[in-house]
Image (tube, grey):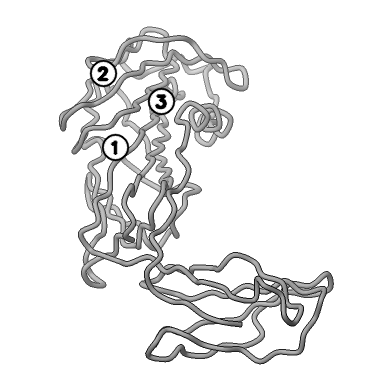
Amino acid sequence: GAMVVLHYVTPSKQGPVDSLRVGADGRFRFAQPADTTAILLISSRWDGVQYFSTPIGSAHGQRDSLVTLVVSDSASSAPIALAARHLVISAPAADGTRSAVDLLILANDGYQTRVPPDLSAASWRFLMPKTAVNLVLGESDFAEEAVQFHGDTLELHAAVPPGQRQLLVHYQIPPATRALSVPWAEGTPVVNVLLEEAAATAGAPLARADTTTVDGRHYTRWTGAMVAPGAIQLRFGGDGQLPGWVAEAVAGCFALGLIVMALLSGRRATRPLRPSAVTATV
């Protein structure tokens, strides 16, 4: 009963050319003129996730004209873990506000796609610092409309396929903040906190590591792992107020820093899906 789409890729054009619904045995057949220059792909959508077959040739009689389209089983209970978290906090701006960039690496290590149990429910939730303001989703692996902020809670309303996905969140820390409690709802094997202020510190279980210079800005890196739910306490050296001559805008200056952190995270490759749902002959 799944709907499948046939895609042609040639030197001059590419795109879908036909579609149909598979039979009760999961098999289907497309009838298309042979084109030795074309590469064919079969796709099928399952629980909001589009799956593609491996490419096949279109010449008649080729052995690779038999294709198996693998569609992952889905489950609302497939576990989602936080594989890594990278937090960058700037020195205070002229008004005392600190800018933060929070990179979350979600991991679905199973063979099932995590889907919300219904349209109004979230597939994953995460706590942000209570005093954070102006939370905005940055460039992520999920659409902007799939992420909602309710107070200090981030809610993801989207399917999470097997493998790793990124969530990037921008927010600000109010002026005169001397300490920040960063909550953790679960254990996390890789944690990096980069602080621009030389006097700023991060509490246990993080340990001071090295210093990193990005685009002329100097950060101290604190690293470690969260083995259980809890919080990391960050302390800032001053009262969040800088002299009036310091008018540098810091929001949005962390792109290179995020690249560095992504390299540190060592994203794992997506695990292969378990063959389960649809087979076809073309």
Query: Which numbered disc covers residue 178?
Result: 2
| Three-letter residue code for mark 2 | Arg
Q: Measuring 47% from the left and 52% from the top, which residue is drawn there? A: 141
Secondary structure category for the residue under label 2: loop
Residue at x 79% of width, y 72% of height: 10
Residue 277, quarter of picture: bottom left
Query: Answer yes or no: do the residues labelled 1 and 2 have beta carbons within 8 Å?
Result: no
In the shown orientation, is residue 40 left or right of residue 222?
Answer: right
Q: Amino acid at mark 1?
A: Ala
Q: As rendered, which of 121 and 10 lies closer to the eye? A: 10
Q: Which mark is residue 28?
A: none
Name the front one of labels 1 and 3. Answer: 3
For label 3, the SS is strand
Relative placement, left or right, of 258 versus 58 is left
* SS assignment at label 1: loop
**With 45 as the anchor, is 129 left or right in this view?**
left
N-term mark: 1 or 3: 3
For marks 2 and 3, give the one nearer the viewer.
3
Residue 89: mark in rendering: 3
Q: Which residue matches tag 1?
A: 132
Assign the C terminus to one quadrant of the image: bottom right
- Residue 146 in the image: above or below residue 61: above
